[in-house]
Image: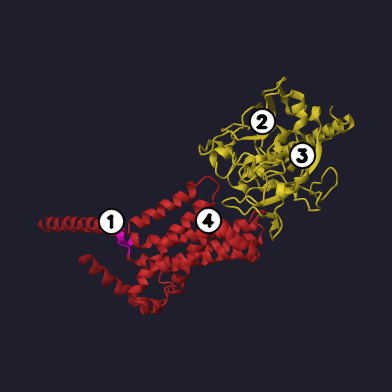
Amino acid sequence: MIKIPSSEITPEQLYRSRRQFITGMGALTVAAALAACGTQPAPAATGPAPKTLSGKTTDELGDALNSFDQITTYNNYYEFSTDKEGVAPLAQGFKTAPWTLTVGGMVSKPKTYAVEDLVKQFGEEERIYRLRCVEAWSMVIPWLGFPIKKLLADVEPTAQARFVRFEGVYKPEELPGQNDGYYQWPYVEGLRLDEAMNDLALIGTGLYGKSLPPQNGAPLRIVVPWKYGFKSIKAITKIDLVDQQPTSLWMAAAPNEYGFYANVNPNVPHPRWSQDTERRIGEISRRKTLPFNGYADQVAVLYKGMDLKANY
Amino acid sequence: MMTDNRRKTKDQGTSAANRAFVRRPSSFVPKNWLQIAIHVGALLPLIVLIWDFSQHNLTVNPIQEATFRTGKTALTLLILSLACTPINMLLGWKRVIAWRRPLGLYAFMYAALHLLIFVAVDYGLDWGLISEAVLEKRYVVAGFTAFLLLLPLAMTSTKGSMRRLGKRWKVLHRLVYVAAVLAIIHFVWLVKADIREPLMYGAVVALLLVLRLPPVRRTISAIRSRLSLTTKNTKRTKAVRNLSD
């Protein structure tokens, strides 16, 4: 079944809760001090640059990781703001605990998991992935998480299930962007069941060896590295197995631009962004975009015989 | 008429004091504090951009941010320059007419900067990629055409060109309307799904263009002259009443 040595799970948890306790105490002290001075608390200082658990500094292609600062200050997260730099400050107060994930639909064993139990049950591993935004910028991010397939195995999809539908959190009182009626909130995304079962597809729980910051989709998000970034839905609360292809938020907003598959594909032009090149955040010149974002060996087989121009 | 004459005499009075400024051929020479404010206001976005760049304050994707900022500033200044004529028409503020040129030229400057960043910095002068982008992305075509239309206008913005071209100058400079519409289309086509912001800019441009239509113009000047007549009449009645007091 799940090949996660218990030795890896417990210390990880202990280590993290201890760290959270310490940072929590630190934050409290600082907050108290600031409150005493009557000033606004500034966003938490990052201190020494965070390191990956594995100690790696590049992806498998030898490309350098983006910094923790880059990853946590430049976010497309319309639930908070359409301004990428505006997300992090707005997201700081977002409550990510308690949090549950409800998995249902066409499954034999529908379940509701508390976030902390998910990590206990399915473990956590570091995966260094490229993230390619449809806006033609990209980053290399060391995620923590576990393959979606582990979760799916636990709920046992029925024979009718063909797609996985993900739903993001809906809390307009905490997420200012959701008061904007232009988009059909909550955020919805979907994968074909075989895509979700691919080992690359993750449920993300952290980055740079720490829990996910709220602006990156805490406490749980999807990470599908061979698809454009908008497929990797943040702050998920619900997963349903369904027999019909789900309509994502972006498909509903602009069906001619955003398809269900949204595989990174330099050969399928987008009306606005050059998809044959991209800018890696931190670099000046553009670089060539790789088919399936460089993961063709692992995922191209999923789309054998499909017209990828029609199924964009 | 009377009010106009009176204003003229008054203007002559002030211009006598400021003759040194007024006599200069270029409208880039400040005539008054408002004129200075225009130059400072138009240069401020560039100064802020350079400052933010030096402070690494242009997001982690500075090239995109600089492209956005210069583009939006260019459009805003172009709209302001297009607003001068209707403002004079509606409110009778003659001096705004002189602001059209500096505002238009600053709009061109930011448009040129916008294009330069796109071509030289974003695409690193990779002509293969650039021509591909131009052919493939309709928003690039719209934006680039708008720039090409502004180019001859900027080049013929001098008094000398005005004299040389005579009546044709006015016809040529109507291209600015086409450029403004293309700039809006460029904006609409480049945003991600939510076109409310470009449509707001578009509504302003549409309004400014509609106000220029001859029937609209005629109606406005008819209303204005009727209004100024009534004010004159009330003044006269008041004067008569004062006399009788």
Q: Are marks 3 and 1 in contact (CB under 8 Å)?
A: no
Answer whether residue A39 is visible to the viewer in this image: no
- To the question of a shared chain for discs 2 and 4, the answer is no
Q: Chain of mark 2?
A: A
Residue where numbered disc 1 is placed: B216
CA distance separating discs 1 and 2: 58 Å
Residue where numbered disc 2 is placed: A163
Mark 2 surroundings: few (<14), some (14-19) or many (≥20) residues within 10 A: many
Q: Nearer the viewer, mark 2 or mark 3?
A: 2
Residue where numbered disc 4 is placed: B139
Mark 3, secondary structure of its residue: loop
Give the image location of residue B20, x and y in percent. Answer: 39, 79
Q: Which mark is residue A200?
A: 3
Give the image location of residue B172, x and y in percent. Answer: 39, 70
Give the image location of residue B205, x and y in percent. Answer: 41, 55
Q: Main secondary structure of the magenta part?
A: helix
Residue at x 63% of width, y 66% of height = B127
Quarter of the figure that contains the C terminus of chain A: top right
Left-right relation of A5 to B114? right
CA distance separating discs 2 and 4: 35 Å
What's the colour of chain B in the image? red
Picture quadrant where residue A305 is located: top right
Question: Label 1 amino acid?
Answer: Val
Q: Which residues are magenta?
A: B87-93
Q: Nearer the viewer, mark 1 or mark 4?
A: 4
The reply to whether the magenta stretch includes residue A281 is no
A18 is higher (above) or lower (below) than B81: above
Front residue of B56 and A104: A104
Q: Chain of mark 3?
A: A
Q: Earlier in the sequence, mark 2 or mark 3?
A: 2
CA distance separating discs 3 and 4: 35 Å
